[in-house]
Image (tube, rainbow, N blue to C red):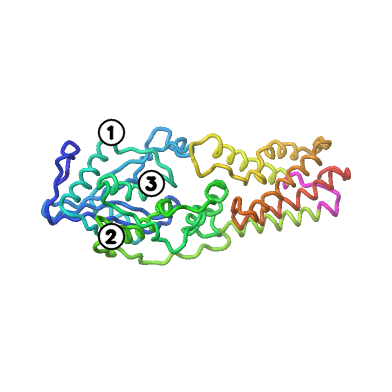
Amino acid sequence: MWITSTTWCRAQLSPEAEISVITCGPGSELYASFGHSAFRVRDPLKGLDLVYNYGTFDFNTPGFYTKFAKGQLLYSLSRNSFENFLYTYQLEDRWVKEQLLSLDQEEKNKVLQFLEYNYLPENRDYLYNFLDENCSTKIPEVLERALPGRLALDNNYLDHRYTFRQLIQQYLRTNSWASLGIDLALGSVIDRKASPREHMFLPDYVYRQMNHAQLNGDSLVKKERSILEKQKKDPPAAFIFTPAFWLILLFILTAAITYIDLRKGSRSRALDGFLFLLTGILGVLIIFLWFFTDHTATLYNYNILWAFPLNLLAGIVFLRKKPGSEWIPRYLVTITCMLLLAPLLWILNIQVFSPLMVIIWASLGLRYAYLYRYFKTGSTPAL
C-alpha cells in the first residue's frame, strides 16, 4: 500500500512498523564516491517497505549542467520501494547497512508524517550544497524537526576531528584524477577543522553519530545489521592512467626540451604555448568557481597563484615566433614570485595543495627560469 501525498497528515503505521537509517558504501563514480544515506520505513502489516531518499536529482532539468556548475541545482526527496533501491546497490557492488531506530508508536508516525510532508511536490526540492545540504545532513535534520527536543546528538562521538579537505580525501586515492581535480577546484575555506556536526555531510559519520545519539535519554539505535556486503575489491588503477604518470612525463619533457633549448639558444613555442595556455585556462576556471557561482567550497582558492588567468593571453603571445620581449622578463618575475607563494601558503597551512602540485610547480619553475634567461639575454630567435 502506497501512502498518497494527500494523506500525509493522517499517515499511521502499525505496531509492527520499523523506521531505520540506511547507509550505503562508496561507488565507482565520482558522485557516488562518498556513499549515501536514506530513511527506510517498513510496515509488514500494511505492506509498506519504502525508502525516502534526499539524494535525487533529474538529469532532464533544463540547464542541468549550467545549474550544476554554478551550484544552483535542486535536489529532491524521492520515495521508492526498498526492493528497487537495494537492487541498484547490488548492481553497483556497494555495501548497505541498516540502523533500526528505537522509536515508540507516536514517534514513528511523526517521522513518517514529516517525511510525507516533505515529499509533497511543493516541499520536496531543496538547494543542494555538498558540505551543508545533502542526503546525509538531512538525516539528523529530519529527526530533530520531526521529534523536537527529544534527540540529543553526541558532540564527542569522534576519535579525531578532520578538516573538510581531509574528510573528502579519505574517500579518494591521492594519485587519482578525482582527487587532483577536487584539490584544484576547492579553496582554502575547506582547510578548517569541521565541527562534529559538520562531519555529518558524509554518510559514514552520520552512521557513527546515530550509534552515539540518544532519544529521550536512551540509545537512538536499538539494532544494526548488514544488508549487503561488497563482493569484490576495487582493482588498483594502472600507473599509466594516473595523474602522477602524466605529470612526471610532463616534467621530463619540460626538462629535456629546456636542456635542448639551452644548448641551441632557442625556444620551443609549442611547449611554452602549452604550459601558459593550460595554466591560464585553469586560472579562468578557478575565477569562475570563486566569483561567479554559488558554491561555498570554491572560495579563496590560492591555486590561482600558479594557475594564473593572464597566462591565457601570455600563451597566445608565446606561440608567436617573435613576441615583443620588453614586458616578458617582468611578467616572468611576477608569476615566478606568485608560484613561490603557493608552497609557502602550504607550509603556513593556509591552504593544503595536492602533493602532485610539486611536480607541476617544478615544471613551471624550470621553464619560467629558462624563459627569463632567454628573453633577458636576447638569445637566438625561436625555432
Residue 260, picture quadrant: bottom right
Residue 229, picture quadrant: bottom left
Name the spot of residue 138 as percent of width and height, x first.
34, 47
Name the spot of residue 49 as percent of width and height, x first.
19, 52
Name the spot of residue 81 as percent of width and height, x first.
23, 50
Amino acid on which disc 1 is placed: Glu
Which region of the structure is painted magenta? 261-271
Residue name at image x 75 percent, y 40 percent: 318
Q: Residues within 10 Å of mark 2 (few under 14, many from 20)?
A: many
Residue 86, picture quadrant: bottom left
Q: Secondary structure at mark 2?
A: strand
Q: Nearer the viewer, residue 293 or 215?
A: 215
Q: Is residue 87 magenta?
A: no
Label 2, label 1: how far apart the Cα atoms are: 29 Å
Q: Is residue 102 above or below residue 320?
A: below
Label 2, label 3: how far apart the Cα atoms are: 19 Å
- For the residues bearing labels 1 and 3, Cβ distance under 8 angstroms: no
- The residue that mark 2 highlights is 98
- The residue that mark 3 highlights is 134
**Residue 122: mark:** 1
